[in-house]
Amino acid sequence: MLAAPRSDLDVSGILAGIPKGAWVALSNDETKVVAYAAELQVALDKAKEAGEDAPVVLRVPEADAATILL
């Protein structure tokens, strides 16, 4: 099962430089990006290769706008 980030998590700093629309796999403690890719499965495969078996997954918004996850 994929995990979503905590609703109170501000990931703006760790997502700096990640392309818009990319799928991002965060470490399970949600402190760093372990992988990202245009396709979800590729990001998950890269995360697993990096040793993160249960990453927190999110997608970088296409538009420059605030996103609140509840």
Image (cartoon, rainbow, N blue to C red):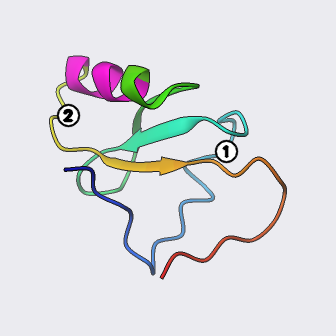
Identify residue for label 2.
52
- Which of the 4 quarters of the picture holds residue 35? top left
Relative placement, left or right, of 10 versus 65 is left
> In the rendered image of this protein, does residue 6 appear above or below residue 58?
below
> In terms of secondary structure, where does tag 2 sit?
loop
Foreground label between 2 and 1: 2
- Which of the 4 quarters of the picture holds residue 38? top right
Please name whichever residue, 68 or 35, is drawn nearer the observer in this view of the structure.
68
Segment tinted magenta in the rendering: 43-49
- Which of the 4 quarters of the picture holds residue 11? bottom right
Residue 16: numbered disc: 1
Does the CB distance between marks 2 and 1 fall below 8 Å? Answer: no
Residue drawn where x is 61% and y is 35% of the image:
22
Residue 28 on image: x %, y % = 23, 51
Report crowding for label 1: few under 14, some 14 to 19, many 20 or more residues within 10 A (C-alpha). few
Residue drawn where x is 54% and y is 69% of the image:
10
Residue drawn where x is 20% and y is 34% of the image:
52
Of helix, strand and loop, which mostly describes the magenta segment? helix
Q: How far apart are marks 2 and 1 (CA)?
A: 21 Å
Question: Is residue 45 found inside the magenta-colored segment of the image?
Answer: yes
Relative placement, left or right, of 10 versus 17 is left
Relative placement, left or right, of 67 versus 47 is right
> In terms of secondary structure, where does tag 1 sit?
loop
Q: Which amino acid does label 2 sit on?
A: Glu
Please name whichever residue, 11 or 53, is drawn nearer the observer in this view of the structure.
53
Report crowding for label 2: few under 14, some 14 to 19, many 20 or more residues within 10 A (C-alpha). some
Residue drawn where x is 30% and y is 20% of the image:
45
Relative placement, left or right, of 32 versus 12 is left
Residue 36 on image: x %, y % = 49, 29
